[in-house]
Amino acid sequence: MGKNIGTVLILCLLPISILLSPYGSAAAVERITAQELNAKLCSAQVVILDLRDSELWEKSKIKIKCSRRVDPEDLSHWVVTLPFDKEIILYCCS
């Protein structure tokens, strides 16, 4: 039980750490509604990243259209591949 809480906490804090790191320039994490996300789906100007655990992601019947799953534990590998000229949306709910 404690491990699950720790994992959820890490997954929720990860987007904040990315945006406040040298890779991001946002001063605060902006939240969007489901309707706002729906309007941005599959846009060439948006990258949607799913940060869920691989096991949870594979078992899930619900995945955001046009999103890509990345391993939150492998941040240093994929964060450098993110485009700087696009909006990055991070999804971490399970």
Image: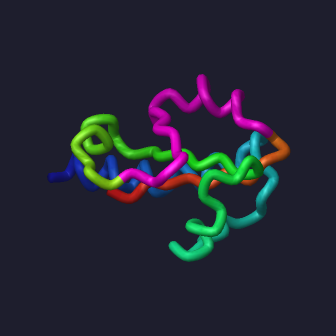
| Residue at the spot 60% in from the left edge and 58% down from the top edge | 41
Q: Residue furthest left?
A: 1
| Residue at the spot 38% in from the left edge and 59% down from the top edge | 93
The answer to whether 67 is drawn above or below residue 38 in the figure is above
Q: Quadrant of residue 30?
A: bottom right
Residue 9 in the image, given as x and y percentages of width and height: 39, 55
Q: Is residue 66 magenta?
A: yes
Residue 2 in the figure: left or right of residue 22: left
Q: Quadrant of the C terminus?
A: bottom left
- Label tally: 0
Residue range of the region highlighted in magenta in the rendering: 63-83
The answer to whether 80 is drawn above or below residue 9 in the figure is above
The answer to whether 33 is drawn above or below residue 5 in the figure is below
Q: Nearer the viewer, residue 89 or 15?
A: 89
Q: Is residue 17 magenta?
A: no
Residue 13 in the figure: left or right of residue 62: right
Residue 78 in the figure: left or right of residue 87: left
Residue 85 in the image, given as x and y percentages of width and height: 84, 45
